[in-house]
Amino acid sequence: MKIGNIKLKNKVIIAPLAGYTNQAYRMIMKEAGAALTYTEMISCKGLIYSSENTWDLTEIVDSEHPVSLQLFGGEVADLVKAAILIDEKTNCDIIDINMGCPVKKVLKAHSGSYLLQYVDLIEEMVSSVVKAVKKPVTVKIRAGINHQKINAIEVAKAIERAGASAIAIHGRTQSDLYRGNVNLDFIKMVKENVNIPVIGNGDIKTIKEALYMLEYTKCDAIMIGRGSLGNPWFIKNLVSCLEGSNEFFEPTKDDRINMIIKHYQLLKDLKGDYIALLEMRSISGFYLKGIPGAKEYRQLLVNAKTEDEFFKILERLRKN
């Protein structure tokens, strides 16, 4: 599969996840075999007004490529300005526009899935960005505002006309948030109505679910978000399965603890020990899923005040 001039080695893509898909996380997922990763969602206005915290989100290390940098904004001019900055000042491979986020804060900024009700504006936004940059441009959408206003086909066709290189679609509406089950028919109908690559997204937590989405919707690739959290072995096993292997790796408790330590060290090298500790408090619990006593140790790790305390808790878990 190719997105513009970027060739992907397989069909497994890691979704953008605010607060999680930083450099360290992307490096772990890339090492597990993912073909493409995304940055966290990045504010156009933050880039335009030179917010240091926003620009920090654009940093990419060489081992990560290819990487897609995801922008969100509610005005054509802002999207174009931010995309040009990204095109010229970062080493990302793809520029993605978020038109699918259902979170209130994003909707209030007239961004994300708020835009789905304005098909002409979507086409203008995407076309303007495509014309302004050299990198391939993609768009992430949902099926519509709600189940009375499903317009994914209309939106997808507008995005294709505008010159986008691929579309990712989450199989829920804005009003669904993350409730209920993903509707694969939404992904299927987009795939059947456009000629550019379509990436399916939503509720992929097992190899069976991944294979079924690919088979049922005929999408070109699958995007995994929450199902990848703390579980690089799932990504590794899925890639192996798609390559025809029947050998799957089942991580032990030690494997999970060692991966937490690796993740911490990557974060520490990139951001320093203070930020590493803060960020690992939230993600370490995902790595512990399935381990006896996980709930207790998750709470202990969340409350760890120092690096030394954090590692002592992990060693206590290892010996338990």
Image (spheres, grey):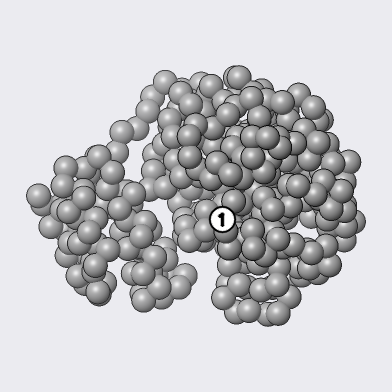
Relative placement, left or right, of 122 versus 252 is right
Q: Residue furthest front?
A: 148
Quarter of the image where the N terminus is located: top right
Q: Badge 1: few (under 14), some or many (20 or more) residues near its Cα, within 10 Å?
A: some
Residue 243 visible in the shown view = no
Secondary structure of residue under mark 1:
loop
The location of residue 282, given as percent across then percent down, is 36, 60
Q: Residue at x 76, y 24 (%)?
A: 192
Give how far across and how far down residue 30 sits, in percent. Answer: 52, 48
Question: Relative to residue 167, is residue 272 drawn left or right?
Answer: left
Question: Which residue appears at 33% of the width and 69% of the height?
Answer: 277
Image position of 28 with respect to 214: above or below = below
Q: Is residue 152 above or below residue 39?
A: above
**At label 1, which amino acid type do we have?**
Val
Return the x and y of residue 262 as percentages of the image width and height.
Answer: 35, 57
Is residue 208 visible from the viewing direction of this image? Answer: yes
Residue 128 location in percent, x, y? Answer: 88, 57
Residue at which label 1 appears = 103
Of the pair 165 and 190, the residue shown nearer to us: 190
In the rendered image of this protein, does residue 226 appear above or below residue 135? above
Residue at the image position 68 percent from the left and 35 percent from the top:
148
12 displayed left or right of 148: left
Q: How many marks?
A: 1
Which residue, as the protein is rendered here, is positioned at the far left? Answer: 320
Which residue is painted at 28% across and 43% down in the image?
Answer: 289
Left or right, 147 with respect to 208, comes to right
